[in-house]
Amino acid sequence: MSHLNILRTYALSDPAKIPSAVLFSNKSTSLTIYDAFPKSIFHFLVLPRMAKEDTTSDLTSLKTVLMGDKAYAKKIISALAGDAKILGDEIEGEMLKRYGFKWDIWTGFHAVPSMKHLHLHVLSTDLCSGRMKLKKHYNSFHPKLGFFLDIDAVLTWFDAEPSYFEGVSKLEAKAYEAILKEDLVCWSCNTTMKNMPTLKAHLQGEWNRQAKLGRKADKGS
């Protein structure tokens, strides 16, 4: 099975036939799966389901969805946002159960995705994972660089001036891919790091301190 098309395969599948190691949950219009290469302690993908006979909508990527019918695009993205909110509540419950405190969650799209079929990333903000290996991995989720598009920000595009929507929805790959080569900068404290091992150690230290403070606050409440 092609890695590039695996999400499309899941979107067309009967959820009962998707391995439990892959599928976290399913709804009538979406699937939530575990990210196969998680970049944080918690990292999921929410993707719209498709009927096998559905050939009218192009759900290849955020770009193709935005290029289609605007009302349909807003409906699809709004539905994903709603399902992601429910997922976020579940993640927070698991954070408390496993770690004794909860921390923030990011929800958004990659401007230039590496796999076909629209998918929404929902991940905890620690970015502490053995799968976080390369500069492009980190910069693709950095919340301030622009490659990672927060879903609430994307939803505001639909109410903006038509000319703005037309421009921002083009998602030109060349411009966004340049972001992946930018310097490694801690998203939280804005400190520039010399390499990935240094950054990863820094992020782990940041999360350890956050965990200590979070557990202390929880005990004092």
Image (tube, rainbow, N blue to C red):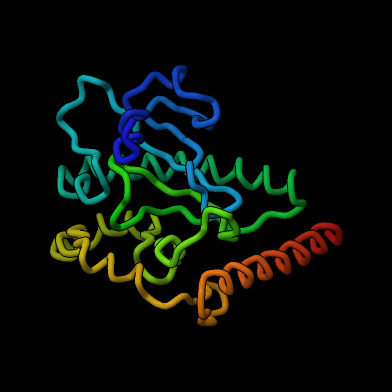
Front residue (pair 198, 59): 198
Quarter location, residue 5: top left
| Residue 165 position (above or below residue 115) | below
Above or below, 87 relative to 161: above
Q: How many marks?
A: 0
Name the residue at 34% across, 38% down: 3
Seen from the viewer's position, the closer of residues 197 and 17 is 197
The picture quadrant where one finds residue 12 is top left
Q: Is residue 106 above or below residue 6?
A: below
Establish if 190 lies above or below 204: below
**Residue lying at 40% horizontally and 46% vertically, measured from the top left:** 120
Q: Which residue: 41% across, 45% down?
A: 81
Q: Kindly give the residue lying farthest to the right in the view shown.
A: 220
User: Which residue occupies 36% across, 22% down?
Assistant: 13
Q: Could you tell me which quadrant the C terminus lies in? A: bottom right
- Residue 33 in percent (x, y) is at 47, 36
Placement of the N terminus among the 4 image quadrants: top left
Q: Position of residue 127 (x, y in %)?
A: 56, 60
Q: x and y percent of residue 63 in the render?
A: 22, 51
Q: Position of residue 194 (x, y in %)?
A: 51, 80
For this rendering, which residue is in front, 100 or 126?
A: 126
Q: Give the side of residue 10 with respect to residue 207, left or right.
A: left
Whether residue 106 sits left or right of residue 13 in the image: it is: right
